[in-house]
Image (cartoon, helix red, strand yellow):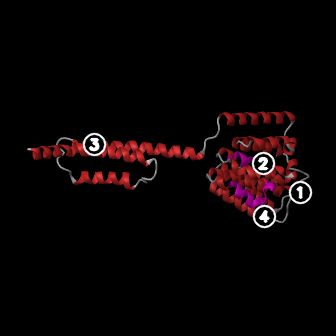
């Protein structure tokens, strides 16, 4: 990694008798690939590594010659670029960035498909790769690729099974893709995994996202209710404390702020607001009775006399 890119490119050109010598443009591409790898792995400069990969891919696209070495360079730049995007926490743009350079989903190399499936599965977004993986596996030319079986296995275990698509998983195993990708023992093992997942789904059905959202909102509102109720009780005790005297402007202002928060900033039409209002009215009645009931009793007694 520390040697110069030119000497490394020269070593590649002389490593095999059957390989033709590298052209100056290809030597430059190998040097750029080495620089991107050094920026990513040694210097941890992920943005610089991604920019270098982009420049390398653009240069490869403008080159006329298309051979195995160009294809390997393109895949290597993409692999380093994917790693850089993941380190930059820009994983959501990985698939679209790869498609910019390969144009069609079925033309993506097998090792890049494997990386994308693992990446999106790790971040909890396996559905992003569902359509791309399906198209890639159904392409007949890809069935002859060295990593076809690995892509099929990752698609089954990290996309279909986590998403609960057990019927599609069975079709994949029993269909043409499964016959090309798996041995008989592997197919049986895959079917056992799918059956186990289906049984788990039946025993523990997935929660309704709307119900989870409502429960979360209700929990949040409940905690806020307890906090504001405690604030009102504190205000209630402060107003009734000995020596509190008459209402001060500060206490009146505090009470006005609390009433504004409870009544104005809350939609009374919501069912969850009924408990707020009932608790507020109950506390206000207690405060009113405790503060002004003695005055009304005195006034009533004086009138009777």
Where is mark 1, residue-wise? 20
Would residue 170 be found to the left or right of residue 241 on screen?
Answer: right
As rendered, which of 31 and 75 lies closer to the eye? 75
Above/below status of 297 relative to 79: above
Q: How far is disc 4 from disc 1 in space, using C-alphas? A: 21 Å
Above/below status of 304 relative to 85: above
Residue 117 on the magenta segment: yes
Would residue 92 be found to the left or right of residue 236 on screen?
Answer: right
Which is more foreground, mark 3 or mark 4? 3
Q: How far is disc 3 from disc 1 in space, using C-alphas? A: 94 Å
If you read the primary sequence from the N terminus, does the residue marked by circle 4 or circle 1 appear first?
A: 1
Where is mark 3, residue-wise? 286
Where is mark 4, residue-wise? 61
Residue at 72% across / 36% down in the picture? 198
If you read the primary sequence from the N terminus, does the residue marked by circle 2 or circle 3 appear first?
A: 2
Whether pointer 3 and pointer 1 mark residues with C-beta atoms closer than 8 Å, the reply is: no
Where is mark 2, residue-wise? 111
Q: How far is disc 2 from disc 4 in space, using C-alphas? A: 20 Å
As rendered, which of 234 and 184 lies closer to the eye? 234
Name of the residue lying farthest toward the front: 304
Q: How far is disc 2 from disc 3 in space, using C-alphas? A: 72 Å
Give the residues in magenta. 94-120
Disc 2, SS: helix
Residue at 70% across / 60% down in the picture? 54
Mark 1 packing: few (<14 Cα in 10 Å), some, or many (20+)?
Answer: few
Residue 4 seen from this side: no
As rendered, which of 104 and 283 lies closer to the eye? 283
Residue 133 seen from this side: yes
If you read the primary sequence from the N terminus, does the residue marked by circle 2 or circle 4 appear first?
A: 4
């Amino acid at each position: 990694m520390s040697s110069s890119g030119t000497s490394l490119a020269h070593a590649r050109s002389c490593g095999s008798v059957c390989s033709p010598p590298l052209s100056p443009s290809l030597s430059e591409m190998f040097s750029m690939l080495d620089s991107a790898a050094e920026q990513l792995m040694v210097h941890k400069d992920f943005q610089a590594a991604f920019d270098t990969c982009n420049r390398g891919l653009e240069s490869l696209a403008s080159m006329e010659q298309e051979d195995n070495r160009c294809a390997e360079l393109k895949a290597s730049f993409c692999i380093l670029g994917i790693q850089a995007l993941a380190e930059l926490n820009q994983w959501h743009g990985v698939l679209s960035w790869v498609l910019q350079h390969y144009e069609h989903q079925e033309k993506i190399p097998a090792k890049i498909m494997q990386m994308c499936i693992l990446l999106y599965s790790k971040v909890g977004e396996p559905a992003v790769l569902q359509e791309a993986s399906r198209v890639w596996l159904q392409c007949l030319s890809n069935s002859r690729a060295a990593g076809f079986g690995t892509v099929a296995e990752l698609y089954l275990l990290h996309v279909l099974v986590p998403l609960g698509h057990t019927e599609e998983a069975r079709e994949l195993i029993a269909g043409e893709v499964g016959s090309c990708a798996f041995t008989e023992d592997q197919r049986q093992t895959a079917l056992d995994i799918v059956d186990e997942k289906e049984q788990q789904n039946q025993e523990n059905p997935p929660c309704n996202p709307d119900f989870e959202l409502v429960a979360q909102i209700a929990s949040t509102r409940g905690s806020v209710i307890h906090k504001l109720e405690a604030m009102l009780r504190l205000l209630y005790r402060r107003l009734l404390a000995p020596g509190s005297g008459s209402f001060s402007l500060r206490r009146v202002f505090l009470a006005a702020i609390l009433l504004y928060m409870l009544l104005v900033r809350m939609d009374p039409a919501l069912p969850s607001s009924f408990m707020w209002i009932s608790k507020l009215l109950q506390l206000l009645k207690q405060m009113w009775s405790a503060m002004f009931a003695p005055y009304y009793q005195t006034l009533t007694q004086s009138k009777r006399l």
